[in-house]
Amino acid sequence: MVLATTGVWNPWPRVWSWVTQSDPIAEGVAAWQTAIGGSPKSITITGGSVVVEYRTSVEAYGTAAGVKLWKSDADWAGVAGSDDDAVVVVGRLLTKGYEVLDPATGAVRRKDTAATAVWTYADAILDLRCPKAGECELSAWDPRGSKPLWTVGTGGIGFVLNASNPDLPDTQPLGSDRVDQHAGGPQPLPDLIGLPGDGKIQIIDTAQGQVTQTRTPGSDQRVTVVGSRVLTVTGDARDGTCYYSVTAHDPPNGQAVWQREGLNLRTADNGSHCKQEKDPAGGSDVVLGVDPYGKEELIAAHDGRTLWKGDKGQSVLAVNNSYALIRSVDKKTITARSFGRGSVAWRRGVNSGATAALTPYAAVVADEKPARVIAVSPRTGGVLTEARTDAKVYAAGPSGLILVSGRDMAYLRFGSAAAR
């Protein structure tokens, strides 16, 4: 019957191939599309490679044609460096040490056997090791270097920090369901970082490699490092509500540079208990706050200047040190605000459910009804690429975007926008 019906002895391989055939993620726009090994934790475009991190492995694909270059077993991974100087840092949970791999070949460039935590940046790798009980040290490395740039003693804090990029008290990017919050790849190493442990935060100067200050937050305080300032947010629970104040200090002298009363950096959930458990949103030197009247505003952490203050109902969708993407009250327009020019850089009409993100290479707008992804120049608003798709943007690089839908990944090159 099978032979008479189909003309072949075994039709099922062809039938199964047809059933599992993937739909195009961005038909007519994607340079290539390929199946990947599962749901990714993160994706980074670097040099000629696309590095995909899964729960128990990491893979790399070529940007030219989406061909798999290599695969390595790992519980965590991070990309350090940029372009042709980038590396992939991988490790195992509950196992000290890590390996530094070449993103093009997967070859091991350097191996460490003692570090408990690693942070990856666009220009450095930081690692933390505790050779003796109660004695830890933090080291900075050039991404492709073989000797540390500096090492500083930090005391016994390693037991609370482990694996890749553990959370530090800094700013967090604004989230979007359609664009991964780390789509822009590794960020430059900040001038200061805060290293938490034992109820304290050590403020470390990353240029000199030294501890400049140690802060012990009070029970009603949240300490976070933003640019070259240390911000202390105090929440005072009174009259059934929470009253906030923010003070910026300049390490190492510890002197207050500016102070604002009534500024809510959203470090606590709504309510009168004032328990602060979140870092503020913003860029590396800009923070997003809300005034007592519910109006959002963007503040320069260095000197406390108000970079932008919105009307009630306006909302910031994305922000970095150079630009902010702001949604109008009626939710039908996204405006790009340039901090350098102090004015509007461009505007774009959107549907009410649109979200957006900022990366070093593109401002990404994810529109709805119809679902669409648009990458534009942050400076001019000119379209870099555009596609009708509901896929999620996982990564942005100098030349394009990586989108994922299910277990398929597609690459959209800039300059590949389809006809509207």
Image (cartoon, rainbow, N blue to C red):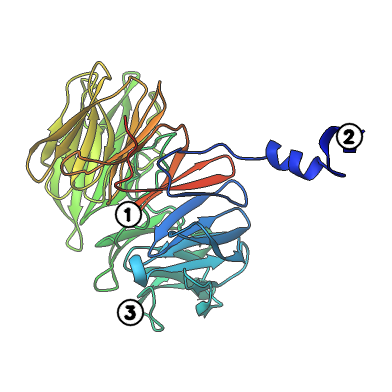
Find out whether the residues at labels 1 and 3 contact each other: C-beta distance under 8 Å. Answer: no
Task: Name the image quarter holding residue 271.
Answer: top left
Instruction: Please tell me whether mark 1 sits on a helix, a strand or a loop.
Output: loop
The amino acid beneath tag 2 is: Ala
Residue carrying label 2: 4
Instruction: Please tell me whether mark 3 sits on a helix, a strand or a loop.
Output: loop
- Label 3 vs 2, first from the N-terminus: 2
Q: Residue at x 39, y 56 (%)?
A: 200
Q: Residue furthest top?
A: 330
The C terminus: image quadrant: top left
Residue carrying label 1: 399
Find out whether the residues at labels 2 and 1 contact each other: C-beta distance under 8 Å. Answer: no
**Cα–Cα span, label 2 and label 1:** 52 Å
Q: Nearer the viewer, mark 3 or mark 2?
A: 2
**Cα–Cα span, label 1 and label 3:** 31 Å
- Label 2 vs 1, first from the N-terminus: 2
- Label 1 vs 3, first from the N-terminus: 3
Residue carrying label 3: 149
User: Mark number for residue 180?
Assistant: none
Q: Nearer the viewer, residue 286 or 16?
A: 16
Q: Nearer the viewer, residue 97 or 145?
A: 145
Find out whether the residues at labels 3 and 2 contact each other: C-beta distance under 8 Å. Answer: no
Q: Nearer the viewer, residue 386 or 232?
A: 386
- Left or right relative to 11: residue 148: left
